[in-house]
Amino acid sequence: MSSIDPTARIASGAVIGAGVEIGPYTIVGPDVVIGDGCVIKAHVNVDGHTTVGERTAIYPFASIGTPPQSVHYKGGPTKLVIGKGCQIRENVTINIGTEGGGGITTIGDNCFMMAGSHVAHDCHVGNNVVFANNAVIAGHVEVGDYVFLGGHVAVAQRTRIGESVMVGGYTAMRDDAVPFGYVLYPNGRLVGLNIVGMRRRGFSRDAIKAVRAAYAILFAEDGEYKVRLEQVATEFAAVPEVMTMVTFLRAAKRMVMTTRKRGSQADDE
């Protein structure tokens, strides 16, 4: 049985699952679907054609499913879909999609959106992603599984961030980041590999060794990049983790970070 505070405003047409808790002064729009076991705290706004997955918690002053901050949006019934088991903390904002951008914004399962973070229209965020405080991504950004964005990270529109990328705080990103990469500095530079993140995910020592070797070839300063990419694809065809990198790079439609800071210890920590 759901528990809804009498001061909350639940519009006719909203679908509220079993065991949902909705706190004081929260507003839920008519096209919203709240999954079983969700906890919606006080003073939350959930609007638009928004679906919130089971067991997700949304904290005070978050505004979810609001119209895109885009001059191209024409008021269409675009969507936001949030996965299961997410934590959406105070003052988080997440927008629905635009008609010309695919029409949907998606957040995967078990994501942790810390206070003040923002997901713009038509973004696609994977599973087990963490946005630290005030991390923001512009429209059409793609974020892979297990990505960590540090505090105050800002990601430019249409950027792709591969799985298990770690982005340090106060970084601005405008180029794609290869899977398993480690990105630092205000201008967003690839400095090494997120080895800690790979270990935490349980990757084998052999897989990590292969990714290190592939990284060294891919981002060497000598030779033609396309040749190095095909060399890696041939040498490591049997290593799924390396082929994840290759597939990501082959699909690039814009600049990919390909430089690293000499002497960095990022991939040794």
Image: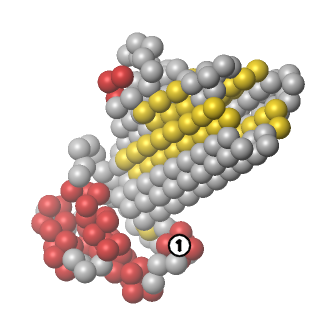
**Among the 4 quarters of the image, the one containing residue 245:** bottom left
- Above or below, comparing residue 9 to residue 3 in the picture: above
**How far from the left and from the top, in percent, is residue 191?**
43, 62
Identified at 49% across, 72% down, the residue is 198
Colouring chosen for the image of the structure: secondary structure
Counting labels gives: 1
- Above or below, comparing residue 87 to residue 262 in the picture: above
**How far from the left and from the top, in percent, is residue 131?**
60, 48
**Among the 4 quarters of the image, the one containing residue 214:** bottom left
Q: Using residue 155 as the reference point, say whether residue 83 is left or right of it.
A: right
Q: Is residue 231 visible?
A: yes
Q: Using residue 46 as the reference point, say whether residue 43 is left or right of it.
A: right
Identified at 40% across, 13% down, the residue is 74
Q: Secondary structure at mark 1?
A: helix
**How far from the left and from the top, in percent, is residue 193?**
44, 68
Q: Using residue 221 as the reference point, say whether residue 67 is left or right of it.
A: right
Q: Using residue 68 as the reference point, say whether residue 257 is left or right of it.
A: left
Identified at 30% across, 78% down, the residue is 239
Q: Looking at this view, is 56 or 259 the one in front?
A: 56
The amino acid sitting under disc 1 is Arg
Residue ID for mark 1: 201
Q: Quadrant of the N terminus?
A: top right
Looking at this view, name the residue that lies furthest to the front.
1
Q: Looking at this view, is 16 or 100 the one in front?
A: 16
**How far from the left and from the top, in percent, is residue 204?**
45, 84
- Above or below, comparing residue 91 to residue 48 in the picture: below
Looking at this view, name the residue that lies furthest to the bottom.
206
Q: Quadrant of the C terminus?
A: bottom right
**Among the 4 quarters of the image, the one containing residue 227:** bottom left
Identified at 34% across, 32% down, the residue is 102
- Above or below, comparing residue 123 to residue 95 in the picture: below
